[in-house]
Amino acid sequence: MSSPAERYAASRRRQQAERSMLGAFRRRLGFELDDFQVEACEALESGHGVLVAAPTGAGKTVVGEFAVHLGLASGRKAFYTTPIKALSNQKYLDLAAVHGKENVGLLTGDTSINGSAPVVVMTTEVLRNMLYAGSETLDGLGFVVMDEVHYLADRFRGPVWEEVIIHLDQGVQVVSLSATVSNAEEFGEWLTMVRGNTQVVVTERRPVPLWQHMMVEKRLLDLYSAHVDPTDVGADPPLNPDLLEAIRRAHRTGSAREVPGRGRGGVHRLDLEGRGAVARRLDAAAHTSAGLDGIWRRWRGEFSRP
């Protein structure tokens, strides 16, 4: 049981949190924030940049929306950038519904709506062009949200993200969001070097399960055994024995063919028309469960990607 002094200190902390910008933001959400969201938002309110790496569906965009809230509350502009027009259009509708159309603008290659608004959603290329043109729209800019910041690693489009991060005024707080940054700490060090103090916030918890399947002929089978938790598959989850047996039968008939890529919803396809890469790899293994399972373990890095 805590002492009176500890209870008093905890009460003071709660009061301070409720009076903070984050407290006001949380009251209008209607749901509780996860720990990683609170950590990132507190870093933003303290004046730091943040890099948030979290699985799809974990709620990274809440941090970007808090940056917009901070901008409006402090009288500074906030830009929300995305890599494609469709995402920009959707985010514009989301933010306009919360803050009103008079406070939110949209700038893409073919659309210009209220570009002088305090909150503007745009493609990253538009922001890059603004920086090189010295646009007056940048005056008073306080926050830039870079959704899907992992595009920086893209061979062709990555320089756009890099140029924006480097050339933004040092007074601008950058909120970087990504579900696929695998080297978050290293990336965060680079951001700190270029932009100043940047806090890295990482969570690996997947609140929305990712169910992965494989299609063998016309059968759709789970990739992992039934007792594997899809929110936390672990480092070496057991594969579905029915799937292994289906592939073994395909190997025996000599008609397995791997279809490149992956279908929607995490479905990997394996047809049975003509001998292909899968059949050849199966030929290299012993006709045993252990041998077949060994092949799949080597491929695990490809088939278990989110």
Image: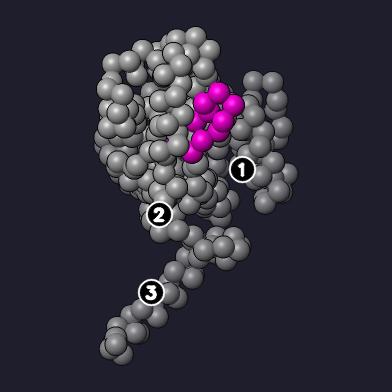
The answer for how far apart the CA atoms under marks 3 and 2 are is: 19 Å
Bin the neighbour count of mark 1 within 10 Å (Cα to Cα): few under 14, some 14-19, many 20 and up: many
Instruction: Write down the region rendered in magenta.
Output: 214-223
Left or right: 232 as drawn, with respect to 81: left
- Image position, residue 19 (x, y; %): 49, 70
Residue 252, how many percent across, how many down? 41, 19
Tell me residue 160's x, y (percent).
45, 21
Name the secondary structure under disc 1: loop
Q: Where is residue 148 in the image (x, y as percent from the top left)?
A: 48, 33
Q: What element carries label 2?
A: helix
Instruction: Please report the residue visible at 34 percent of the width from the left and 42 percent of the height from the top.
Output: 237
Which secondary structure, mark 3? helix
Q: Which amino acid does label 3 sit on?
A: Arg
Q: Nearer the viewer, mark 3 or mark 2?
A: 2
Quarter of the view holding residue 5: bottom left
Answer whether labels 2 and 1 touch (C-beta < 8 Å): no
Report whether 301 appears left or right of 223.
left
Pointer 2: what residue? 36
Q: Residues within 10 Å of mark 2 (few under 14, many from 20)?
A: some
- Asked whether residue 276 is in view, the answer is yes
Residue identified by numbered label 1 = 118
Q: Which amino acid does label 1 sit on?
A: Pro
Residue visible at 33% across and 15% down in the picture: 283
Cα–Cα gap, marks 2 and 1: 27 Å
Q: Which residue is drawn at 71% across and 32% down?
A: 113
Q: Is residue 52 inside the magenta stretch?
A: no
- Amino acid type, mark 2: Phe
**Between disc 2 and disc 1, whose residue precedes?**
2
User: What is the chief secondary structure element of the magenta stretch?
Assistant: strand
* Quarter of the figure with residue 117: top right
